[in-house]
Image (cartoon, rainbow, N blue to C red):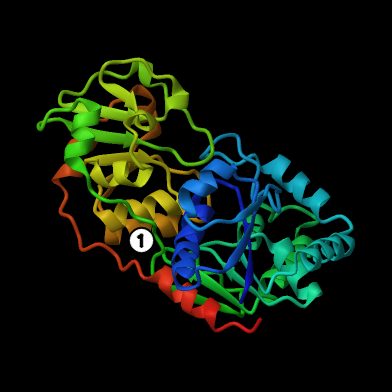
Amino acid sequence: MKHLLIDISAHGYGHIAQTAPVLNLLAQQQPELRITVRSHAPTAYLRQRILHPFEHIQVALDFGMSMFDAVRVDVPRSLAAYRDYHANWAQKVEAAAQQMRDLQPDLLLANVPYLSLAAAKAAGIPAVAMCCLNWADIYRHYARDDAAAADIHAQMLEAYNSAEIFLKPSPTMPMPDLCNARELACVAQTGERRRALLQERSGATGQDRLVMVAMGGIEYRLPMEGWPRIAGVRWLVPAAWGIRRDDAMPFESLDMDFRDVLASCDAILTKPGYGTFAEAACVGVPLMYVPRGDWPEAPWLVDWLQRHGVAVAVDPARLLAGELGETLAALWAMPQPTPPSNTGALEVVETLCKMPS
């Protein structure tokens, strides 16, 4: 294999969090490998995660679901978007197949745009899918009453089943309609615990508890300006929020890798999402999460985290009010289980290396 094409959904950052460890490990074994990444995600973020040189084609190959914010799905707009996306589906697949032929990859790895998989099939290019979810199952969950849903879902499912194999890193949705699925261990790009450096750069004392606030790749700003102080707790927050209080600071200002900050904290506040859940569990950092409504992936994520990590759900009203002292105390009193196995990236690399090209 000389040229690997990677197509990555940009619906949040979990798809990148799953894919980057695979590419980094694969590039260690094949340093001359040419990598092309197609994703709507920002180039700078991709380069933070993917350490091997790559060409980035910034294009949206799918849209997942339209969101009001990180936890609420705009269902009517999403279903309308899918009806539009699947109009003239055969012509769309052929156009995508020609674009793929022009790139001349030896193999496609898709996480997890289904148009890419349908195009690879049409172009005669071997394809592997990898993700803890698929958009066919997500779409069907929200489209039960949509008249066009059956045909659209069938086209999505056909595309996913056209892949040589669909690799499902844990924690994963069941995906019973896939005929080519295989479950893997967890895939997480973990950081290094650098507690002394984090304390120094944040100005925290040895008695302070440091809590990171990271709600994922879809905006979900919390009204922290009005939160009461919690004795001994300091917050590490996104710079984009512009929070101005003396017990909070932007984690970007620490000049540390995001994953190292996460691994060095006493807790993280987030929403259910693959990247943060997996990375926190693997480094043993307790996690508070705001429920994600009826997002169909969430129960599988939460169940896995409660077995492999330390996690407490936060009542949305108490979260908005910043009434988190009791929740944090309960979180820190819970026993720490053995971290999950984090060998999924190696399993993916072994599969890719056995693929015909």
Front residue (pair 122, 200)? 200
Q: Nearer the viewer, residue 151 or 34?
A: 34
Asked if residue 325 shows in the view, the reply is: no
Q: Is residue 262 left or right of residue 295?
A: left
Residue 351 x/y as whole percent: 51, 79
Q: Nearer the viewer, residue 56 or 62?
A: 56
Quadrant housing the C terminus: bottom right
Residue pictured at 68% horizontal, 56% vertical: 144
The structure residue drawn at horizontal position 44% and vertical position 61%, both measured from the top left corner, is: 21
Q: Amino acid at mark 1?
A: Trp
| Rendered residue at 19%/33% (across/down) | 199
356 lies above or below 221: below
Relative side of 354 to 198, left or right: right
* Residue 224, placed above or below residue 347: above
Within-10-Å neighbours for mark 1: few <14, some 14–19, many 20+: some
Q: Is residue 216 above or below residue 172?
A: above
Residue 34 in percent (x, y) is at: 61, 65
Could you say which quadrant of the image residue 114 lies in?
A: bottom right
Using the rendered view, name the quadrant where residue 345 is placed. bottom left
Q: In the image as oriented, which residue stretches furthest toward the left? A: 207
Residue under circle 1? 304
Query: Which residue appears farthest toward the front when viewing the image?
Result: 32
Q: How many marks?
A: 1
Q: Position of residue 167 (x, y in %)?
A: 53, 72
The picture places residue 178, in percent across and down from the top left corner, at: 61, 75
**Vertical comparison of 38 with 264: above or below:** below
- Quadrant in the picture for the N terminus: bottom right
Q: Is residue 355 visible?
A: yes
Residue sitting at x 31%, y 36%: 212
Residue 51 is left or right of residue 115, and the answer is left
Describe the element under mark 1 as helix, strand or loop: helix
